[in-house]
Amino acid sequence: MPTRLAQVGHHQEAKREASNAWVLLSTEEISVSADVIDGIAVASRILSDTAVRAAQFAEIAGRKPCLATVLVGDDPASHTYVRMKTNRCRTVGLESKSHRLSQTATTTEVVTLVARLARDITVDGILVQHPMPNQVDERQVFEAITPTKDVDGVTGASFAAMALGDKGFASCTPGGIMHLLDAYGVDPSGQRAVVVGRSPILGKPVGMLLLARDATVTYCHSKTADLPGVVSEADIVVTAVGRPELIKGNWIKAGAVVIDAGYNPGNVGDVEYSAAAQRARLITPVPGGVGPTTIAVLLAQTVDAAESAHSVA
């Protein structure tokens, strides 16, 4: 006889033991109304702690922690993102230095600027906004960032640290995702996690962070056979492909945790939200889910870098 999954107990009481809060029942499948993961609230807690640490650093070091941003080209979304990050720096007591290069900038020009910032002892963290114009080799630019200032977690050294469990900076969106899971009592250990997307700054690193927490991780991409079948077996689904509602709600396993890191025109994520919310236990909205924690982790890691540099100096 077919089986179905149903939640046991009240949602709030069950959060910390959610992985064990589901039992098999007979008859046809039912819908489950998900709890919405509040990324704004989680980010607010990270930023509050960051503001306290930034003030303490400024008192000891005689200057504020400093994030330098590099923006290449005229992409409106990139300008908006950098402005948001600059404003958020101000609200938590960080200094922000903005650098802009033209749409026609070459790889050499961008690398030269980033290398200069890497040598600047008054700069603690470097953020190179991406995507960059097609003629710029992003990887070459990223690798010009000193690993100790790679607060966005985009260098090969940072990825290696995530993969090997060494000390380093996490990519900010993956780092934010782990904060969301922790805030809602989701323990990845022993869980089947499916990551849809394999970008070097989101899909791949979030899989490494989940693996480090003892999840069994499957990466999916454009060549994956039977994507619906793979997703339907996941206890944790992380999407990062930038394709509106690629992941259908009826693919989601009842009781799964859904983290939608996609952001598409019209405030639409990679997941068919309304249908997925009827089956998931926890789900991130778009916007208001993953995005706020990305910026919060960036600023927290800038203070981490400042504290580390000051203790070494």
Image: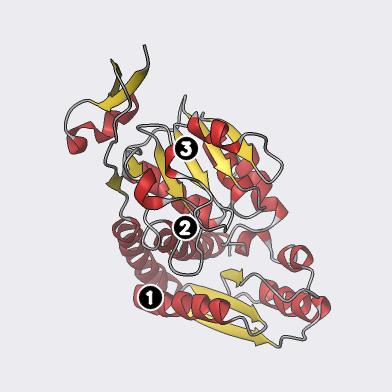
Q: Residue at x 41, y 59 (%)?
A: 293
Relative to 263, residue 188 above or below: above
Residue 63 in sight = no
Crowding at mark 1 (Cα within 10 Å: few <14, some 14-19, many 20+): some
Name which residue lies at 37% across and 32% down: 254
Amino acid at pointer 3: Trp
* Label 2: which secondary element: loop
Image depth: mark 3 or mark 2 in front: 3
Q: Residue tagged by mark 1? A: 93
Is residue 162 left or right of 279 when viewed as pictured?
Answer: right
Q: Nearer the viewer, residue 74 or 214?
A: 74
Dots 2 and 1: beta carbons under 8 Å? Answer: no
Report which residue position mark 3 lands on: 251
* Element under disc 1: loop
* Kind of residue at badge 1: Gly
Q: From the viewer's perspective, is 270 left or right of 149?
A: left
Q: Residue at x 58, y 75 (%)?
A: 123
Q: Position of residue 109 (x, y in %)?
A: 79, 81
Residue 165: x and y, percent?
59, 38
Q: Position of residue 125 (x, y in %)?
A: 57, 68
Q: CA distance from mark 1 to mark 3?
A: 44 Å
**Residue hosting label 2:** 269
Question: Marks 2/1: CA distance?
Answer: 32 Å
Instruction: Determine the image quadrant of residue 242.
Output: bottom right
Structural crowding at the residue carrying mark 2, measured as other residues with C-alpha within 10 Å and reported as few (<14), some (14–19) or many (≥20): many
Q: Is residue 85 above or below residue 139?
A: below
Q: Is residue 161 visible?
A: yes
Q: Amino acid at mark 2?
A: Gly
Along the line of sight, which residue is nearer the eye, 214 or 241?
241
The quarter of the image holding the C terminus is: bottom right
- The residue at the far top in this view is 1
Circle 3: element type? helix
